[in-house]
Each structure stands twice: as C-alpha cells, then as structure tokens.
Image: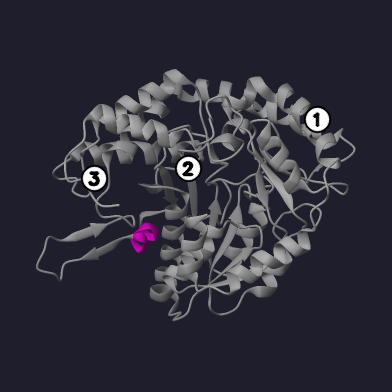
Amino acid sequence: MGIPQQGQSPADILQRLAAYKQHDMAWQDGRVLGYIYSAGQEAEELIKQAFTLYLSENALDPTTFPSTLQLEKEIARMTADLLRGDEQVVGNVSTGGTESIILAVKTARDWARAERGIAQPEMILSQTAHAAFHKAAHYLGVKPVVVPFHPETYQADTAAMRAAITPNTALLVASAPNYSHGVVDPVPEIAALAAEHNLLCHVDACIGGFQLAFMRQLGYAVPDFDFTVPGVTSISIDVHKYGYSAKGASVILHRSKELRRYQIFACLSTTAYAIINPTVLSTKSGGPLAAAWAVLRYFGQEGYRRIVREVTEAARQMMDGINQMPDLRVLGRPNMCIFAIESDTLNVFQLADVMRSKGWYLQPQFSADPLRPNIHITVNHATVPHAAEFLQDLAEGVAETKQLEPLDMAVVKSQIDGLLASLPPEETAASLYAL
C-alpha cells in the first residue's frame, strides 16, 4: 500500500480508522485486564484537551518551548514527592517504563565506567524482573546476570544476588512489584546489599509506584520500596499506568544530580545544532507532558486515594473469589492489584480463550522454570464495578473449559520454540506481527 494519489476527506479517514478499531477489544467497560488504565470519561476528556493543546510543541529545545521544561520539572517533582524523595532527587519524563529502565541501566553503565573503571559492566536481576532490563542490556552492552526467585514468595533471592556479585557488577535491580505476580521484592535488603558493595540499586516501580504509594497513605500494609530506603539510587514510575495519564509518560528519578548526569547524552561535534538529551529521544512531544501534568492536578492526592482504595478492594474481592474456586489459585501473596492464577486441573490458556469469548481479556504467561503456564490479571479503575460479574463469568468459564479436550502445552510450547528458533530475531518479529 502506497500513499494515496489523491488526498481523502477527514470524514473518510475517520471512518476508516473507526472500521480498523472494530477489530480491537472494547476496553471502556473494564473487561480488558491488561494494558489499559482508565479512570473515567471526565479525566480522559481533560487528558485529550491537554494533550491536544501541546500536540505540536517539541520538548527537544526548552529555549524555544520553555513551558515543556516547566511541565517536566513539575511532573518529576510531584512523583519524587510521592515516592518520599528529598529536594536532592531529580528526574525526567520518558515515553514509558521501558525507556525509563533503559535510562537507569545507561546511568549505571556510564557510572561504572567513569567511577569504577569497569569496561564490561554487569547488572544482577531476578528472573521475575521485567523484560525491559534485558532489552536495555542488549542495547547498551551490559551483561545481565539473572538469579532465581523464591519459589513460594516469588520475591528476588537476595542471597543469590550476593553470590552473583563480581568486580564487574554495577547495578542491582528490585521490582515494586514484579509485573508477573504483583509481588514486591525485598527492596531494603537488595538496596543494603548494593550499598555494602558500593553499587547502584534501581527500583522498577513502573506499574506499582502510584498504587503502592497511595495504598501506604491509606494504611494498607505496603513493603518499603521508595527513596526512604537507604541504598536506593533510582526509581522508575509510570504516570500512564496507575497515574491514569495518556500513553507515553513515565518518570525516571535519581537520588542526586551527580548520578543523573550519567543518564544524559550530549553531542557538539556535528555541523548541526547541539544535542543535549536527558532521555533517549531527541524530538519529544509536549502532548504526553501536558496530559500527565494535567491528570496529576486533576485527581490530586485525595482523588488518587479514592481510586486506589476502590481498585484495591475490587482486586482483593477478585483474588479471594478465585482462591475459593477448587480449580484455581492465586500465585504468591500479591502486594497490589495485579496478580497471576494457575490451575492443577485445567489448561489456563484454554480458560483464557473461553473468557475471551465472554468478552474478557486475560493475559497468558508462558511457563518459565520452575513455574507452569499461568494467567496475568491487571485490575484498573474501570474494572471496579464488574468484579462480581468477573467472578461469575470465571466460574462458568472454568466449568466450560473442563469440558474441552485438553491441549498438551508441552507440544504447543515445543512448536512455538521450534518456530522461533528457526528464524533470526528480525524475522521472528516480522512473523509475529504478520499473525
């Protein structure tokens, strides 16, 4: 398909877009339990207006668009305050959790080279850490050293981390929580280990930062994970997840300006304009900045506490209901509103398919030794009114799944592994996108 020879009318273009969207799942009713974070129509309308107001502004050059820098500073300050950072904590807004994590790893790499003389830096992370760390390692030439997690708590194994430290170690990673099971790692132990060995410690709070911080304010039991923990040197937190902003807004925070300078890229040696990039991107839309700034002010702390309480109680209702079903169980003891379920009696991927036929999206998670296949569930504010309906549909879905001919997951996995192994990475990606 090439660019049309003749331009099309706005009405025709919007009609075509609407037709494309008919193939997507309708997320507005809270039945897509992953990827989507919605806090209501009024908030979304404000986000759209704020985003559109800054649709063309480019945060690449704050001397041309100084308001974009002001927005970024205020967003960083608000999130630093939420995570109980002092005035020395500094940060930047990125396009998402993956970019924030890449920046944290870049900071550690460049710090290790400059301060420790390490030519080939390593980072130690649990098997439960997000794949973004592996992407960062691949991009940046940092060696990932993966250690096991505790098979009952699903927390990172601190003793295994200690044993994995070498003279090349630059960074220890903790999750708050891990995405797969919603469990917060023992951050104080990991951060203390990092401090003991003069290492950096990054806390990935991309999905949990907002939810956990306001849960703590409400009196829920929340493990320590923020800047009050000695030894934590950086934290990533996404405004576009449980901050409920538009996609494209995460924050990377550092304990000091001295550490943050290793995040920055500058180039003055070309014939073009000088480049000074605190984040990965050069051109940087003002839209996500304006939307994130607007939603933080719209809800305020009181509004977030209300939302967090409602989401937490709905998630607990769902987890309690699942644990009462003989065929299902929640893995571990999740610390917030994301969790995973597995079964001894049925194929959970078939269950996910049955639930999809009922209008629910549940996210499959393949087996990773020692775990079996399981299903991930993310509860957001749009799901709150539908918690009881979900449990009813899930109970019916279990009964229907048990009537199906079971799939042999070992065969399915071997077929997928064989397909992926037969293709180079670029062809693997192309094949997946062609499905």
Query: On the image, numbered disc 3 is attached to which residue?
Result: 59
Whole-angstrom CA distance, mark 1 to mark 3, is: 50 Å
| Part of the protein shown in magenta | 258-263
Circle 2: is it few (<14), some (14-19), or many (20+) Cα within 10 Å? many
Task: Tally the numbered discs.
Answer: 3
Spot the residue most to the right. 326
The image quadrant that residue 166 belongs to is bottom right
Residue 206: x and y in percent read: 52, 46
Checking the image for residue 396, the label placed there is 1
Image depth: mark 1 or mark 2 in front: 1
Whole-angstrom CA distance, mark 1 to mark 2, is: 35 Å
Q: Is residue 37 visible?
A: yes
The image quadrant that residue 41 belongs to is top left
Q: Is residue 370 visible?
A: no
The image quadrant that residue 148 belongs to is bottom right
Query: On the image, numbered disc 2 is attached to which residue?
Result: 238
For image coordinates 43% across by 49% down, the residue present is 253
Label 1 element class: helix
- At label 1, the amino acid type is Glu
Circle 3: is it few (<14), some (14-19), or many (20+) Cα within 10 Å? many
User: Between residues 164 and 385, which one lies in front from this camera angle?
Assistant: 385
- At label 3, the amino acid type is Ala
